[in-house]
Image (cartoon, helix red, strand yellow):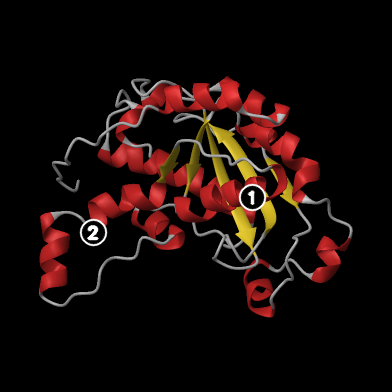
Amino acid sequence: MTMLVPRRPQVPDWAAYLAKRAEHAQDPRLARFFAAGTPSSDTPISEAPMVALDMETTGLDSRNHAIVSIGVVPFTLGRINLSQRRYWVVRPQRPLHAESVTFHHITHADIEQAPELGDVLDDVLATLEGRLVVVHYRHIERLFLDDSVKARLGEGLMFPVIDTMAVEARFQRQTWMARFKRWVGRPPASIRLFDSRARYGLPAYQGHHALTDALATAELLQAQVAYHYEPDMPIGQLWT
């Protein structure tokens, strides 16, 4: 087991933030989402209701690209609820690029009759609300959803997440041994989803499908907690 004595993180007061947003939200869908809140920061991770979220997009810049698919998988530390999984292909407001199509394989024909994000937003929020969202690289899912909602409703959508990429970075890039390896010229360990899963002996899935990657992220967090943490660890030590 990797030995690491992490600095105690500053826990954001997400409960107060969400309560304030619920009070001031103009759109009723956002008001319901914020009012549902999130598990408190001292909730043991073994008791926290979670949902893995993944998206495929037309590019990597949330200001210039758009969401084309969303996958969500509700889960807990002990169980993945595949019967409650949801998957949406949505029609982006920006054009598809040939390069992104080679990754996610969603074509112009797939999105021609697909709903616009605003048409499924109620369902997406209902699946996320009251649960702690888990992603692999928060600068995609959270930023894209925030910018997309802001563009449609004039108000954003921020919420706490556990980022499995950030968790993996703690153990693969921030230990003294990892820093020493970089100092002597060794390349840093990959913390991409595929490579992170391989370290825990998890099976290899075909990537760049939002639902499959959401499932892969849920399984990765379960493995990370089992290997590095105790089940009674407060979620506030992992979320951001």
**For this view, does 11 lie left or right of residue 87?**
left
Residue sitting at x 58%, y 46% = 146
Q: Nearer the viewer, residue 38 or 215?
A: 38
* Kind of residue at badge 2: Arg
The percent position of residue 10, horizontal first and vertical second, equals 26, 34
**Element type where label 2 sits in the image:** loop
Q: Mark 1 sits on what residue?
A: 211
Q: Quadrant of the C terminus?
A: top left
Residue sitting at x 35%, y 32% = 12
**For this view, does 96 lie left or right of residue 176?**
right
Q: Nearer the viewer, residue 116 or 44?
A: 116
Give the vertical position of 133 relative to 38 (above or below). Answer: below
**Element type where label 1 sits in the image:** helix
The percent position of residue 67, horizontal first and vertical second, equals 67, 57
Q: Nearer the viewer, residue 166 or 93?
A: 93
User: Which corner quadrant of the image does residue 45 belong to?
Assistant: top left
User: Which corner quadrant of the image does residue 34 belong to?
Assistant: top right
* Kind of residue at badge 1: Leu
The percent position of residue 194, horizontal first and vertical second, equals 45, 61
**For this view, does 2 lie left or right of residue 62?**
left
The percent position of residue 79, horizontal first and vertical second, equals 52, 30
How many neighbours does mark 2 have within 10 angstroms: few (below 14), some (14-19), or many (20 or more)? some
- Work out whether mark 2 precedes mark 1 in sequence or the reverse, and give the earlier one: 2
Q: CA distance from mark 2 to mark 1?
A: 28 Å
Residue sitting at x 43%, y 22% = 16
User: Which corner quadrant of the image does residue 83 belong to?
Assistant: top right
Q: Mark 2 sits on what residue?
A: 173
How many neighbours does mark 1 have within 10 angstroms: few (below 14), some (14-19), or many (20 or more)? many
